[in-house]
Image (cartoon, rainbow, N blue to C red):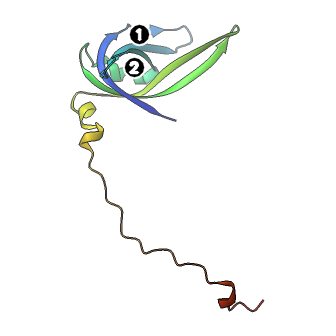
Amino acid sequence: MGFEMKGKVKKIFEQQDFPSGFYKREFVITTEEQYPQDVKFTTVKERTEQIAKLQEGDAVLVKFDIRGNEYNDKFYVDLNAWRVESGESATAASPDAVAATPMPDVPPMPTAPAADDDDLPF
């Protein structure tokens, strides 16, 4: 299941490299709500390139998944960003900018015949 969140980049952390070859980079956005919140996301491997071009203060739309795991009887939750859209694409994806598509005209469903009108042979 995917989620998305709009906001402005507050902080971009340095890339973390691990001996196994795994690498990740974290960043924080401030949401644009009545009560703004700072939310930290993680990008892994080649997806870190998406935030390399960002700067603090840029408007972004983050598409992410929620990941959870257990380690030594402690539970952790991570917001795994798999797509980060910047600038105009973040504002173009707002719900107000998307026009509603009208439903096609569909004829009404036929009603079932009454038990006496049944012409089945059995």
Badges 2 and 1: C-beta atoms under 8 Å apart?
Answer: yes
Identified by mark 2, the residue type is: Thr
Query: In the rendered structure, which disc, 2 or 1, sits on the residue that comes first in sequence?
Result: 1
Q: In this view, does 118 lie above or below 13?
A: below
Total number of numbered labels?
2
Q: In which quarter of the image is residue 95?
A: top left
Q: What element carries label 1?
A: loop
Q: Which residue is drawn at 37% across and 15% down?
A: 37
Residue indicated by mark 2: 48
Where is 54 relative to 1, above or below? above
The answer to which quarter of the image holds residue 50 is top left
**Percent position of residue 56, x then y:** 26, 12
The C terminus is located in which quarter? bottom right
Judged left or right of residue 100, residue 63 is right
Q: In this view, does 74 lie to the left or right of 93?
A: right
| Percent x, y of residue 67 | 56, 23
Q: Residue 41 carries which label?
A: none
Say if 56 sits above or below 2 in the image.
above
The residue pinned by badge 1 equals: 15
Depth check: give the residue in front, 18 or 63. Answer: 63
Crowding at dot 1, Cα within 10 Å, few <14 / some 14-19 / many 20+, comes out as some
Q: Which of 94 and 16 is in front in this view?
A: 94
Element at label 2 = helix
Q: Where is residue 114 in the image (x, y as percent from the top left)?
A: 64, 84
Kind of residue indicated by mark 1: Gln
Q: Which residue lies furthest to the left in this view?
A: 88
Q: Nearer the viewer, residue 69 or 45?
A: 69
Distance between the alpha carbons at the discs numbered 2 and 1: 8 Å
- Classify 10 Å Cα crowding around label 2: few (below 14), some (14-19), many (20 and above): many
